[in-house]
């Protein structure tokens, strides 16, 4: 079975119409966008599907929009395929999507955080005073040297923002300084691409957003990881959810170590990747990595077939059922705001599910029928507590049993 890495795109991947095809075909995608509309208190769906590009590109809109489109795609992916990710990584904003999809951050919290993050980042610089530029074909040292040459002080700063791949680096800073870098490199025949962003991300110019983002992050609680997420700052997996606040605040003004993140996963035996969300930016960045066996993207219904043909699906087994129960527990919308009831009916059963999975992994044993029944019972408690409709509960359980080929083990299983 191939080890699979999930990749979540960052800002700049937005476009009008993103997420619409999934929204129209899958109930779980519609629920995701509707939940975002409710949490953000404006019609994000309309902005994504038919809004103005200038409005969508604004940082405080683009960030929750891309997060929502990515989470919707992830939920469809888990519903339709048998997948057990080995790692996940997200590029800049995409790290929030990765953390949400692994269960470390609740979707509603992530929406509020990235909306606030976008506002803080937008306010950190005067309009049109910041820009980002992708540079193709130069080494790290060559790009760093150009940035050092052009930067004359805090009023004219340009630094490396993203180490994207072996031949693509992104610089960020004051617009005038970025323009000078572009002119110098263009004169030498170096290819550059201006990014569709509205602020100089991952630079010291973001320092003023630090405290506000930290406060927003500290106001939330965080859960366990269903599978490891690679940090943009360290290019290694989070060892604990306690590092979420520090990593995501530091990420504001530190470069994204994307090349090293991909290399880490390759070194751990991940050779198949799925980009989950709008466009194919991250899939395209994988070109040139000799150890990448296959890479696919998922943002449209027709791409399900291509993923199946690539043979990336996990083999059906009991562990797959437990993983699906955890994924459905995370992805199903909550409509119960009784905190005490939520703790006993959702949090405790979810933790028991995660503990069961971890114990089986540590002991390297397959789950028994009783343990699988226990997992289904824990999920039933979670869905009932979240006030999920009986119809949707039946749909979710049918998907789990079908996608893990375990129907025959539980022929009498029903939602009461």
Image (cartoon, rainbow, N blue to C red):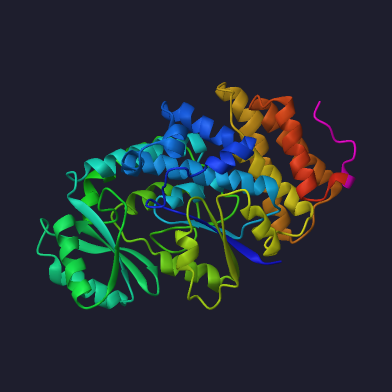
Q: Quick one: 76 or 405, which is closer to the camera?
A: 76
Q: Quadrant of residue 363?
A: bottom right
Q: Closest to the observer: 19 or 206?
A: 19
- Looking at the figure, which quarter contains the N terminus? bottom right
Please state the horizontal and vertical placement of residue 61, each as a whole percent of the image: 36, 39
What residue sits 59% from the left and 37% below the top?
Answer: 24
Residue 273: name its quadrant. bottom right
Quarter holding residue 416: top right
Horizontal arrangement in the rendering, residue 355 relative to residue 224 (left or right): right
Magenta part mainly helix, strand or loop?
loop
Residue 211 can be seen in this image: no
In this rendering, would 171 be left or right of 25?
left
Is 27 a magenta residue?
no
The answer to whether 270 is drawn above or below residue 154 in the figure is below
**Which of 171/346 is in front?**
171
Q: Residue, x 17% and y 50% (percent of image)?
A: 129
> Residue 394 at x, y = what percent?
76, 32
Give the number of callouts. 0
Nearest the eye: 364 or 375 = 375
- Spot occupied by residue 386 in the image (x, y as percentages of width and height): 63, 27
Q: Residue at x 68, y 36 (%)?
A: 349
Q: Position of residue 143 (x, y in %)?
A: 25, 73
Residue plotted at (75% across, 42% down): 399
**What is the span of residues highlighted in magenta in the rendered image?**
408-416
Horizontal placement of 169 versus 188: left or right?
right
Inspect this view and state whether residue 35 appears. Answer: yes
Q: Seen in the image, is 150 located left or right of residue 349?
A: left
């Amino acid at each position: 079975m191939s080890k699979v890495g999930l990749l979540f795109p960052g800002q700049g991947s937005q476009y009008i119409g993103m997420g619409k095809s999934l929204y129209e075909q899958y109930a779980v995608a519609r629920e995701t966008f509707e939940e975002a509309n409710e949490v953000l208190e404006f019609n994000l769906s309309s902005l994504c599907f038919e809004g103005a590009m200038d409005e969508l590109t604004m940082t405080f809109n683009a960030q929750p929009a891309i997060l929502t489109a990515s989470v919707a795609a992830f939920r469809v992916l888990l519903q339709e395929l048998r997948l057990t990710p080995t790692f996940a990584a997200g590029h800049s904003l995409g790290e929030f999507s990765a953390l949400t999809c692994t269960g470390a951050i609740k979707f509603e919290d992530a929406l509020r955080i990235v909306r606030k993050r976008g506002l803080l980042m937008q306010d950190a610089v005067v309009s049109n005073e910041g820009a980002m530029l992708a540079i193709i074909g130069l080494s790290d040292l060559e790009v760093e040297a150009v940035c050092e040459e052009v930067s004359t002080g805090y009023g004219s700063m340009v630094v490396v923002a993203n180490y994207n791949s072996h031949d693509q680096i992104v610089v960020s800073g004051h617009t005038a300084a970025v323009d000078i870098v572009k002119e110098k490199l263009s004169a030498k025949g170096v290819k550059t691409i201006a990014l569709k962003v509205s602020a100089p991300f991952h630079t010291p110019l973001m320092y003023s957003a630090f405290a506000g983002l930290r406060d927003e992050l500290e106001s939330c609680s965080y859960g366990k990881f269903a599978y490891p997420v690679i940090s943009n700052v360290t290019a290694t997996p989070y060892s604990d959810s306690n590092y979420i606040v520090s990593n995501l605040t530091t990420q504001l003004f530190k470069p994204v170590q994307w090349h090293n993140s991909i290399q880490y996963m390759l070194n751990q035996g991940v050779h198949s990747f799925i980009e989950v969300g709008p466009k194919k930016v991250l899939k395209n960045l994988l070109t040139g990595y000799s150890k990448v066996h296959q890479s696919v993207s998922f943002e449209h219904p027709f791409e399900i077939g291509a993923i199946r043909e690539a043979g990336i699906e996990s083999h059906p087994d009991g562990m797959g059922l437990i993983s699906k129960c955890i994924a459905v527990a995370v992805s199903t919308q909550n409509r119960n705001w009784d905190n005490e009831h939520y703790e006993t009916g959702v949090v405790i059963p979810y933790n028991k599910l995660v503990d069961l999975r971890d114990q089986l992994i540590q002991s390297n044993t397959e789950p028994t029928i009783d343990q699988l029944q226990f997992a289904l019972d824990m999920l039933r408690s979670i869905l009932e507590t979240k006030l999920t409709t009986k119809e949707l509960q039946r749909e979710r359980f049918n998907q789990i049993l079908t996608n893990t080929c375990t129907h025959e083990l539980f022929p009498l299983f029903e939602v009461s």
